[in-house]
Structure formats: C-alpha cells, structure tokens
Amino acid sequence: MTHMSTEQPARRASGAVVPVLAFTGIVVSVMQTLLVPVLKDLPQLLDTSSSNATWVVTSTLLAGAVATPITGRLGDLYGKRRMMIVSLGVMVVGALISAFTSTLLPMIVGRALQGFAMGAIPLGIGLMRDILPREKLGSAMALMSSSIGIGSGLGLPASALVAQNADWHALFYGSAGIGTLSIIITLRFVPESPTRAEGSFDLLGSLGLSTGLVLFLLPITKGSDWGWTSGSTLGLLGASVVVLVLWGVMELRIKAPLVDLRISARPAVLFANLTAVTVGVSLYVISLVLPQLAQLPKSTGYGLGQSMVVAGLLIAPLGLAMMVIAPVYARLSARYGPKATLILGLLIIAVAYTSGLGLMSAPWQSAVISAILGTGIGLAYSSLPALIMGAVPASETGAANGLNTLMRSIGTSLSSAVVGMVLANTGNTVNGVEIPTMHGFRVSFLIAAGAVAIGLLMALFLPKSNHASQLRASSEENAAIERAEEALRGFRGFRGRVLDAEGAPVARARVTLIDRRGRQAGATLSGDDGSYALTVPVQGSYVLAAKAAGHGPLASSATHAGDDRAVDVDLSLPGETVSVS
C-alpha cells in the first residue's frame, strides 16, 4: 500500500500552472525542429560532410528517447517538478555550448543535452494529474500532451525567421533564454507533486534500456546513409534485440524496475504505446515534406518557390490547431471516452494525408493540410496519456507517460529515416544537388497514411471503456460517485485510489470511513479510475475499509489533523480470499 500525505495540492495550484507547464512542453519540443530551417546548410556551417552533419539532429533525437523514461522514473521517486527543473537546466547548458561553437563535436554534445529535456513533457503530464482538480485535468493534459506538436508547428516558423535574419547561433541564445525563463516561472508557479513511488532507482536497468535504444535508433536514423543491408545496420539492429530482451528479463525479476513491464503489457497500455509510434510517424512526415516542397523553386514544375519563413509558416496551422483542439478534446473525451477520441483523431490524420496527395500545388493547400493534421494529431496525442493513466497507479505516471513519449520518439525516428530514404532514392540530381521529386513527396504521404492505418488497427484492440454503462448504474451508486467527484474538488479528508494486487485501478469498490469509536463516518464507491474521496468530521485516527467483488477486503489506518487539507491514501486490495466454515 502506498501511504502519502499532502497539503491539498489542488488548492495550492494557481491558475498559472497549466499555461506554465504547457509553455515548458512547447519550449523543449522546439528543440527537435530548431535546426530544420538551416539543415541543408549545416555541412558548410560546421565545415564537415553531409553525413556527419546529420548527427547534429540525430543526437538530439537519441538523447530525448533515452532520457524520457529515465527522467520519468526519477520524477516518480524524487519529485516531478525537481526533475523538470533538472531537465530544463541541462537543456540551457546544451544550448549555451552550441551557441559558442561552430565545430562538429561540441555541437553534437550541445544538441544531445538539449534533447535530454524531452522528459519534461511526461513529467508535466504527471504533475497535472497530481496537483490539479479533477474537472480541469482533461483539457490540461490534452494541452500538455499536444505541446510536442505545438512546439514543432510554431517553433519552425520562429526558427526560420531567426535563421533568415540573424546569425544561426542566435537560435541557441534564444533557446537558452526561453529555457531559463521556463525554469523561473516553473519554480514560481508550479508546486511540487506530493506523490512518490516506492523503491529505488534502477541504475542497471537505465543503462540497459539506454544501450538498447541507442543500438536500435542509431541504425534507423543512419540506415539510409550506411545502407539498410550493410553489416553496420544489421549488426546494430541485431545487438539491440539481444540487449533489449536481456533487459526485459532483468526488469521482470527485480523488485523496483525502471519500467514495470507487467503494467506495460496490459492491453490499455500496450496498444496505446503501439499507437503512439504511428502517431509519431504522422507528425514528423509533414514537418519533413512541406518545408522542402514549399522552398523548391517553381522552375521544377512542382515547387512552390516560397521563402524559408513562409515555408515555416505553412506548418504553423498544425500547432495552432493542436492548441485549439485541447479544450474540445476534454468535452469529447468526457462524453465518449479517450478510445473514441483517439480513433477519431487517427481517422482525421488519415483523411489529411490521403487528401494531401492531390493538394500540393499551392501554399494555401499546404496550410489547410497542416490545420487538418493538427486537429487529428491533437486529438490522438491528447487521448494517449488519458488511456495510460487510467490503467496505471498514481505513483507510476511519470515512468508510464515517459514510456509513451519514448514510443512517439521511436515513431519520429522511423519517420525521419524512412522518409529520408524515400526522398533520396526518388530524387533527381540537378547541377550536383539532389532535388526531391513530387513522386517522393507523395510516397512519403502514403507511408504516413499507412502508418495511421496500422495505428487504427492497434486502437481497435484497446479495451472498451465501461464509462457509459456505469453512467446507467443505479441511482444510489451514481449519487455516491457524484459525492466522490465533489469531494475531489477541495475538502478536508482522505482521498486516493483503490488498486488491485498488480496496481491496476479497481472501479466501484466500496470504501468506508470508520472513526476511533467504530462508527461509520462516511462511505463511497470508487470511480472509473479507482479514485475515491471521503471527508472527515473532526480530527483524529480513522480506519479506511475497502472491499470489491473478486478481491479480499482491506482495512488501513490513517490520521487526519482536522484542518483544511487532504491526506492521500491509496488502498491496495489483496487477491480474492476463500472462506472455510
């Protein structure tokens, strides 16, 4: 059983929490597309070859993928806000290193440190769950989850504007500045989460996962340069399989693993993570294709002949649409459930990419495709953390969302590698320069549509939500759930989640509050996600008794000071017991 106390975080959290955390998510996601406007010029800027220059982007992607589950677990153990500040601090250091160099190796190191900050997004999602009142949680998590796409969509034109009108190092000075601002406002407005996971940090597991991910993502990102059938590519992929299998066996045997693979194997978590890969693919394809198409000269017969800044602006509707869709998602999800909104989002993405095959001849068409894609990706990204957090205990949210963000990173890596290979193999050489063709752009869109089709298939395997059937339950039970919802909005008493022996939430468990004289002081039923809340009449010692069909009963002692605070107590029910008379 996890036993925690806190100072009513929902009351301490100011109205600035959501915009501050969303701003932080946007800041760190900008790092992924920061150098896209100057990508073609990097070999000259760094005085190196084209294949070496790609490491400046690859290092950011790899570091983000490796850091995300590790910082998530550290946040669960030692504080999510604390680890968010550490991540942002590392990003600022990396930006300053890059700002003061024009040499390849220091630039790669700086960019890798900037990628480390990607872990701030799942940490922010976990913080929102821990400190926000429940009625604000849906739209807030949607906005935070969508910040990956918002940062890419809005950061690209901003980066292009800076790169076109100033020295390219100004991109890094700007990154250090907004990173520092993000640290300051996070410290000022975001309270620390009171929730802590039990156990210790799995150092060996983190090293094993990091090694396996690098061995897997490295040949994916470099496969088009090395050759997909080369010894280096196949050898590293084979080594990654071996390392990750051994890592998985080890994680299943230790008491406090970096990633709880048993929880990750639950259908709600497993298929959400698999779907996240396909959504990651769909997000990055548009970022790779549209800017190139827009900047190609009209003399090619299909290029749009736009400037670097205009090319970036054509992606901006994607980020704007994701911002607008966050509150809409909250209403849709409340009515139909996150599985339905995920499927709707994937369908919109598929429509955007298939219709985009015939809408590539004018800048306004690119802007329309970006807006439609932003709507679909916003719905899909917003649904994923809701699905994940409905299936994991509160103390595991940082690591669980970190793993989901990792899956998106794998999707973007796959997208970058495959689209890069397609455009290279279908390109034409003009005056010694490789020019992408319209055929290559269309094949890239078809690949994105195919990935989304696979995502739809994965989403269909997600467990059905019992939300609608529970709304039709008896009036007595509904009243109890409403009382629990009301209690979660601010009260003095006990609250938490009812969990089974494996840490999964138990819905409709009866929780009874008993005072020290043995009298019942309150009772309620747990909600869809296992949450419950009970007010206390006076200070003192109490017993929380919980029972549910298919589980053994549990009685847990807890003390309340009687002031206007909440005490969090998670109740872990044992397996079903058999009585012998």
Image (spheres, rainbow, N blue to C red):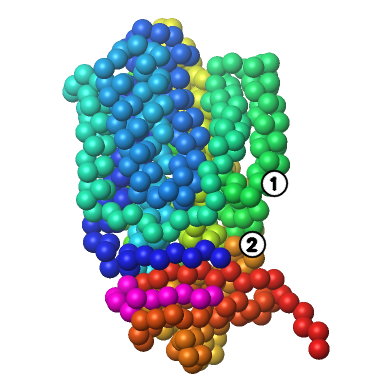
Residue nearest the viewer, comparing 495 with 150: 495
Residue sitting at 46 percent across and 45 percent down? 74
Determine if the magenta segment contains residue 560: yes
Which of the numbered marks, if any, corresponds to residue 502? 2
The region drawn magenta spans 556-565
Position of residue 567 relative to residue 148, above or below, is below
Determine if the magenta segment contains residue 5: no
Position of residue 364 relative to residue 383, above or below, is above
Direction from residue 336 to residue 117 in the image, left or right: left
Amino acid type at circle 2 is: Glu
**Residue 431 place in picture, x, y as percent:** 41, 7
Position of residue 156 relative to residue 433, above or below, is below
**Residue 575 place in picture, x, y as percent:** 69, 71
- Number of other residues with Cα within 10 Å of mark 2, as a class: few under 14, some 14 to 19, many 20 or more: some
- Number of other residues with Cα within 10 Å of mark 1, as a class: few under 14, some 14 to 19, many 20 or more: few
Residue bearing the label numbered 1: 253
Residue sitting at 36 percent across and 72 percent down? 566
Direction from residue 327 to residue 579 in the image, left or right: right
Give the mark, 2 or 1, whose residue is nearer the N terminus.
1
